[in-house]
Image (tube, rainbow, N blue to C red):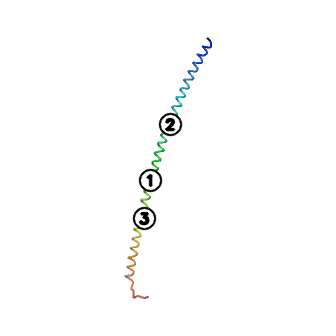
Amino acid sequence: MLDTIEATESLGNMKSDINELKLQLDSIKERQLESLDANIRLQEKAADAYVLSKEASAISKSTQRELEATSNNLKSEVSTMIKSVEEKLDIIKRATTNPLDRR
């Protein structure tokens, strides 16, 4: 009879220990779920940042190409203008020079 009483008392202690362990396990599960949720949000933000960096890189490259094309066009126009001015100067020099003057 004493063995039965002791067994039931220890059974009551075991039940409270089991309930405490269940609470701890539920708490651990909740923290794991929160960590997983935070990890997913971080991965989403990292993916967004990666996409934005790729977009910024593409915009930068296209802007650079556009700038180079515009610069090359301006160089070509300036070069053509300089040649035109030099040709006109040569014409003016020839027109104003007296071929009979031999100094």
At mark 3, the secondary structure is helix
Label 3: few (<14), some (14–19) or many (≥20) C-alpha neighbours in 10 Å? few
Instruction: Please state which amino acid type lies under the numbered disc 2.
Output: Leu
Instruction: Please state which amino acid type lies under the numbered disc 3.
Output: Asn
Quarter occupied by the N terminus: top right
Quarter occupied by the C terminus: bottom left
Q: Which mark is residue 72?
A: 3
Image x and y of residue 90, in percent: 40, 78
Between discs 2 and 1, the one toward the N terminus? 2
Q: CA distance from mark 3 to mark 2?
A: 54 Å
| 28 relative to 9, above or below | below
Number of marks in picture:
3
Between discs 3 and 2, the one toward the N terminus? 2
The residue pinned by badge 1 equals: 58
| 4 relative to 60, above or below | above
Image x and y of residue 44, in percent: 47, 42
Which residue is pictured at 41% across the width and 67% down the height?
A: 76
Nearer to the camera, 37 or 82: 37
Image x and y of residue 60, in percent: 45, 55
* Left or right of 75 in this view: 7: right
The residue pinned by badge 2 equals: 36
Q: Find the residue positioned furthest to the top.
A: 1
Q: CA distance from mark 3 to mark 1?
A: 21 Å
At mark 1, the secondary structure is helix
Label 2: few (<14), some (14–19) or many (≥20) C-alpha neighbours in 10 Å? few
Q: Residue 79, located in which quarter of the rendered image?
A: bottom left
